Amino acid sequence: MTTHTRFALYYTAPGSELAQRGAAWLGWDIANGHSIAPTAGPSDAVATPRKYGFHGTLKPPFRLAPDKEPAALAVAAREIANSFAAFDIPALQVTTLGSFFALTAEPNAPLAALAAACVTRTDDFRAPPTDAELERRRARRLTAPQETLLAKWGYPYVLEAFRFHLTLTGRTEKAEREHVLNQAKAHFAPCLAAPHPINAITLCGEREDGQFEELEVLPLKG
């Protein structure tokens, strides 16, 4: 039986061309938990996000509290999925967020509500962050509101600080950004324009080798 060191709730666009292209970009198929030959993503730039798989974060990765079981977390995640109707988000675009690239969409109220529910309604399952984890988060010079979110929820970019994105790269150097941008736009071009259905959330786990894999796809209502 596979042991998972952390868990997360993601949007993974299961079964879609977007998911297939995301896996090919990163060289990791999160749905099936194995490596694939990368066909587009620059290997040095995708090394950091590769372990997480192609995803948009809803509930950031967390260690399970000592008195909690993965099966109970799955039940709680299913309850969240069952309480939201499926909806669409607008077209995606390749965006620079600081020094890394991601696919982003315009702010969407149903998506923000879904992410907030994932954060708050599973928080009893989260073990408190370690001092090392807190130091790593604070190294980015958090604002006062972000520090408050970190203290309460274990992550500084949730709730009012949430911005949906599907990460494509780690930090990139200025000299390579135009090239990476052009690669990403070309690779994802066939599936950027149309609205994208948010019809499921995905419970994922981090294996002992550090790679995240899909544990269960949880359909939303309708």
Image (spheres, rainbow, N blue to C red):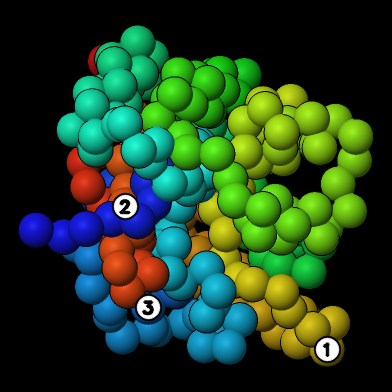
For label 3, the SS is: loop
User: Which one is in front, 115 or 188?
Assistant: 115
Residue at point 62% right, 19% down? 109
Circle 2 residue = 205
Give the class, few, some or many, for how many residues have Cα within 10 Å of label 2's Cα (few <14, many ≥20): many
Position in image of residue 16 (x %, y %): 30, 50
Identity, as a three-letter code, of the amino acid under mark 1: Ala
Position in image of residue 78 (x %, y %): 26, 23
- How far, Cα to Cα, is label 2 from label 1? 35 Å
Q: Residue furthest top?
A: 83
Position in image of residue 193 (x %, y %): 54, 48
For label 1, the SS is: helix
Give the class, few, some or many, for how many residues have Cα within 10 Å of label 1's Cα (few <14, many ≥20): few
Q: Locate the C terminus by quadrant.
A: top left
Quarter of the image for residue 22 reads bottom left
Quarter of the image for residue 174 reads bottom right
Identity, as a three-letter code, of the amino acid under mark 3: Gly
Residue at point 71% right, 67% down? 100
Q: Earlier in the sequence, mark 1 or mark 3?
A: 3
Circle 1 residue = 175
Residue 51 lies left or right of residue 90; in this view the side is left
